[in-house]
Image (cartoon, helix red, strand yellow):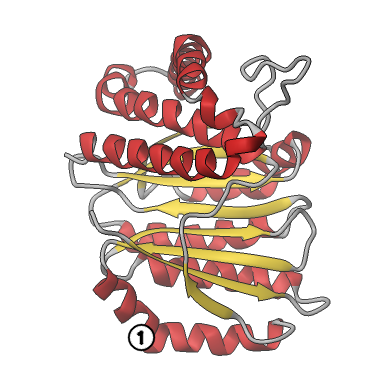
Amino acid sequence: MNAARLTTTLTLAPGADAAFCAWQARVTRAATGFPGFLSIEMLPDEAGACGWRIVQQFRAGTDLERWVASAERDRLLEQLAPLCDGAPVDRMAAGPDAGAGVTEVIATVVRPGREADFHGWAETIQAAQGAFPGYMGTYIQAPPSAAQPFWTTLVRFATPAQLDAWLTSDVRRDLIARSQDFVERWESRRLPSSFAGWFPEGPGRLAPAKWKQTAIVLLVLFPVVMLEMRFLGPLLSGLNVAVGTFIGNLISVSLVSWPLAPLAIKALDWWLQAPAGSRRRAEILGGATVAALYALEIALFWR
């Protein structure tokens, strides 16, 4: 897949946070319904900052060009302009680094023919979570194929407590209840930003950058989640949601903790702990290696 990616950077005007959260929900709904859509991610420079990056990925350059030239996106940019301090800047870019914070990974299966209901509901819940303290952005990925009809959503907050405050809120509980008619099933798991004990520290050895830690965990977690959805999910479908989710989380956490994460860390230690004299070369080769492994995993689970 020769995907195309567009990164839009912007700086919010003072007092525009609430309106920008609502705008994020509208642009997400529009992009997810556009032909060729793969994913959209919104990341602040840091928790509470005014600078944001919006990363949109489409299956091909032609799909992205049609989206960029569409009247729908033009209207959204017109709505965004009064919220910004200066004009937003579009550019082609590689995938964004994962920032600090803690992330909840949510996989959702939408009932056939109810996608429009799901898009409208997703717009509402995204606007609601954006109003909660500590919100640091959302990543949404369309189903890779008809055989794997899972919408993947990553919701990031600055701290576990702030994420839990949103996940356990009455607002979210009511919205989840409203989705039962068009959501067949869903599951979620916590993806923390710091993985104590997995990345050993000591004299002359510092913990890798958080984005590298997240990259490694995503590398080993993704195939586990995909295999669980494909093979374990149907076996657990008859169980209570809490029991089925607990079993799935138990298996995935156990496999990632041992042996997958330690093996990946050992294999990529030359990148995680690049020596100063060859750091630039190691960073380039390591980033390319991880990107190639991501592409291989996606290809393996594409059908």
Left or right of 8? Residue 44 is right
Q: Quadrant of the C terminus?
A: top left
| Residue furthest front as drawn | 277
- Please give the name of the residue rendered at 30% of the width and 34% of the height, measured from the top-left corner: 297
| Residue furthest right as drawn | 14
- Please give the name of the residue rendered at 55% of the width and 62% of the height, measured from the top-left corner: 124
Residue 281 percent across, percent down from the top left: 51, 42
Marks counted in the figure total 1
Q: Is 12 placed above or below 246 here? A: below
Q: Is 200 placed above or below 59 here? A: above
Q: Is residue 188 visible?
A: no
Left or right of 253? Residue 213 is right
Report the residue marked by disc 1.
Answer: 70
Sort mark 1 into few (<14), some (14-19) or many (20+) by Cα contacts within 10 Å. few
Q: Which quadrant of the view contains residue 198?
A: top right
- Please give the name of the residue rendered at 49% of the width and 50% of the height, measured from the top-left corner: 178
The foreground one among 166 and 145 is: 145
The foreground one among 155 and 87 is: 87
The foreground one among 199 and 185 is: 199
Residue 289 percent across, percent down from the top left: 39, 37
Q: Which quadrant of the view contains residue 197?
A: top right
- Please give the name of the residue rendered at 61% of the width and 81% of the height, measured from the top-left corner: 88
SS state under label 1: loop
Q: Give the amino acid at mark 1.
A: Ser
Q: Which quadrant of the view contains residue 5?
A: bottom left
Q: Is residue 31 visible?
A: yes
Q: Is 191 placed above or below 127 here? A: above
Residue 200 percent across, percent down from the top left: 67, 16
